Structures are given as structure tokens and as C-alpha cells.
Amino acid sequence: MQREGVFREMKLRRNFEKPSERKARETAEAVRRARKLERKRLEREGF
């Protein structure tokens, strides 16, 4: 369930989130994911 994001989804739905806050959060999450993937890729290549 954690992998599917159920717990995160429940936490986010407890309070109303303004559309501007949601966009900022989703952008930040996308940046975090991209950086994590890049780190893993560089680690695999041996840099």
C-alpha cells in the first residue's frame, strides 16, 4: 500500500490544498524524483 501511495494520498486529503499549493508540491516532487533517478543512474555507471 505504501508503494502505491495510499498513505500519502490519505494524508493529503485530510486538509484542503489550494491549487497553487498543489502545483508547487507536485513540481517539487517531480524534481525530487528526477534527481533521485539521476543519482541512481550515475551510481550504476560508476561516477
Image (cartoon, grey):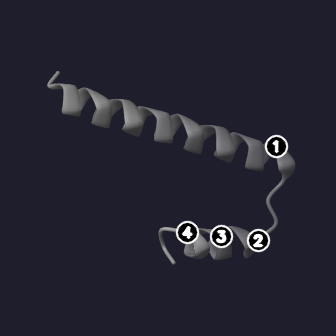
The CA distance from mark 1 to mark 4 is 24 Å
Is label 1 in contact with label 4 (beta carbons under 8 Å)?
no
- Under circle 2, the secondary element is loop
* Labelled disc at residue 9: 3
Specify the amino acid type for callout 4.
Glu
- Which residue, given by chain and number where applicable, does mark 4 sit on? 4
Q: Secondary structure at mark 3?
A: helix
- The kind of residue on which mark 3 rests is Glu
Say if 42 sits above or below 7 in the image: above
Mark 1 or 4: the one toward you: 4
Between marks 4 and 3, how big is the CA–CA gap? 9 Å
Q: What is the x, y in percent for residue 6?
A: 60, 74
Using the numbered discs, state the Cα–Cα distance from disc 2 to disc 1 in whole angstroms.
14 Å
Element class at badge 1: helix
Of callouts 4 and 3, the N-terminal one: 4
Secondary structure under tag 4 reads loop
Q: Which residue is mark 1?
A: 20
Residue count near mark 2 (Cα–Cα under 10 Å), binned few <14, some 14–19, many ≥20: few
- Tell me the quarter of the image containing the C terminus: top left
Between the residue at mark 3 and the residue at mark 1, the CA separation in whole angstroms equals 18 Å
Mark number for residue 15? 2
